[in-house]
Image (cartoon, grey):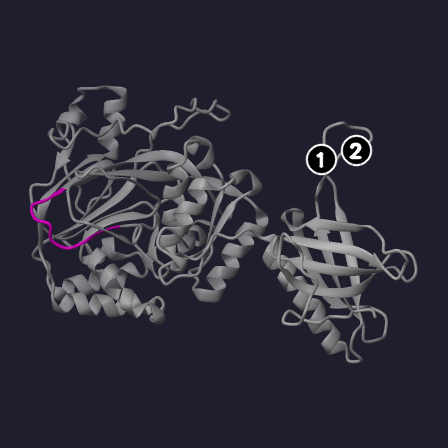
Amino acid sequence: MEGAQPGPGASSPQSDSAEVLLHGVFALLGAAPKASYALSLTRGRELRMQRVGSAPAGPSAALDLADCIGCVAGREPQPGPAAYFSVFCYPFRKGWWDASPSRQRLARTFRVCLAQEAEDNLKLAETWAGKIRELAAPRIPRQEERPNHARELVRAGDLSQWDAVAVLAGDGLLYEVVNGLMERQDWQAAIKKPLCTLPGGSGNALSASINHYAGNTQAFRKELLTNCTYFLCKGLYAPMDLVSLSTASGKRLFSFLSFGWGFISDVDIASEKYRQLGNARFTVGTIQQLAGLKVYKGRLSYLPMETSSSVSSAPGSPSEQNSHHVPCSNGHPLHILPQPAPGAPEPPHKGSWPEDPLLVPFDQPVPKHWTTVPEEEFISIFAIYQSHVGADFTMAPTAKLHDGSMHLFYLKAGVSRLGLLRIFLAMEKGTHLDLNCPHLHYVPVRAFRLEPFASTGLMTVDGEPLACEPVQGQVHNQLCRIISGS
């Protein structure tokens, strides 16, 4: 009865603790002659094995698929119709030479020879292998299952069973994961769990940025997914900055990509209805927003990188008093704050969120060494911390994963629709600053505050909508880790 397989929809033996998804009888390769096992694959992530063909039946055993690192299927090398599937696990075992358990390799290969045709046997073997791989990989549920599902999972989940958290989606789901990790009591340890972004949305800005940092050419869709999957297989990770955002209503958010208000945020939110178009949704959204161009009124203040460096080394220095906003035609160098020494001990766990020492309460004016933009009418204000704002939009080509800064762009009112269109077309190649547009300003900053004069429009954080209200934020250098190309 080798290979007897009633199929997923047929009557199968049931377990008291878990539903049986697949059941069949297969020969175990490498075992004694005629050693066959009845296999039951359960929803409880177990592969149960019981030897058959002997009286009485042999003892049962089970492979915990939480220990499974892979399962492959293929055709047997010798002529014939048989196929096989192999399960590879690393369960904890206690060796005779060591009292403490350690992971040891365990591989089992099962022969599939139910049908006369090789293709049919291979298809059956691949069915088992695919279902085993699916159950072996703990997954973050899709955001569409319900809002904040991923946030709830990582906030309450047992992170010890995960080596990394891989998110196959757009930037919005990773935003949920980051904030879920930061809401844990053990956030200081949890946020150091390596994160991985695999592009499965329409924006995929962080994936495109990581691909850019690795020195690869611009990639989209399947090619970008292949590149990011390759990074995951390499298993290398790098530190990444996070930005702490606080609102006047008392919200505290953590962002890895961007904060925006005005035109760019309007394009992002309004184009949601065109998600089926992929990256082209932003082109459609841009044209739509150009037709009804809006002006936003508010006060923008920020702490430039060069000023924050001067203040940290010499409070009250002349550069503190003479800070100024930087138009896009100027090319001031980027000053990086000193980094912790390699191997420096982690700060002790305090059970509370990291402090924002550069920020003051909203009822107080910004510090004197900050810069306040004299203009108060804007088309768009956008702070980005990665190179890309979309897979085909390179907004800050010099950005790095942990350069300790936000790349702040603000577009003053008065720019023409044609001029605005030229900026966005140039942004595809990252050459928008070369246009020397007098309305477009760029400055790397360490912190900022935005105070809208009216609750007009929506703000966005990592592409997710946020109610319009006063908001301020600062960079926290190297707060988390991300799977990257180097």
Nearest the viewer among 132 and 339 is 132
Q: Main secondary structure of the magenta part?
A: loop
Region rendered in magenta? 451-460
Q: What element carries label 1?
A: strand
What's under tag 2, amino acid-wise?
Answer: Gly
209 relative position to 227: left or right: left
Mark 1 vs 2, N-terminal side: 2
Q: Label 1, on which residue?
A: 102
The quadrant in which residue 362 appears is top left
297 relative position to 33: left or right: left
Residue 337, horizontal then vertical, whole percent: 33, 30
> Which residue is depicted at the point 32% across and 45% down?
385
Nearest the viewer among 14 and 224 is 14
Q: Which mark is residue 6?
A: none
Residue 333, horizontal then vertical, whole percent: 28, 38
Q: In this view, does 1 lie above or below 239?
A: below
Residue 35, horizontal then vertical, whole percent: 88, 59
- Callout 2: 10 Å neighbours few (<14), some, many (20+)? few
469 relative position to 51: left or right: left
Q: Which residue lies furthest to the front in this view?
A: 16
The answer to if 168 sits in the magenta stretch is: no
Asked if the residue at tag 2 contacts the one at tag 1, i.e. Cβ–Cβ closer than 8 Å, the answer is: yes
- Quadrant into which the N terminus falls: bottom right
Q: Which residue lies furthest to the right in this view?
A: 33
Q: In this view, does 300 lie above or below 28?
A: above
Nearest the viewer among 360 and 469 is 469
Nearest the viewer among 255 and 133 is 133
Q: What element carries label 2?
A: loop
Q: Label 2, on which residue?
A: 95
> Which residue is depicted at the point 52% across and 60% down?
226
- Callout 1: 10 Å neighbours few (<14), some, many (20+)? few
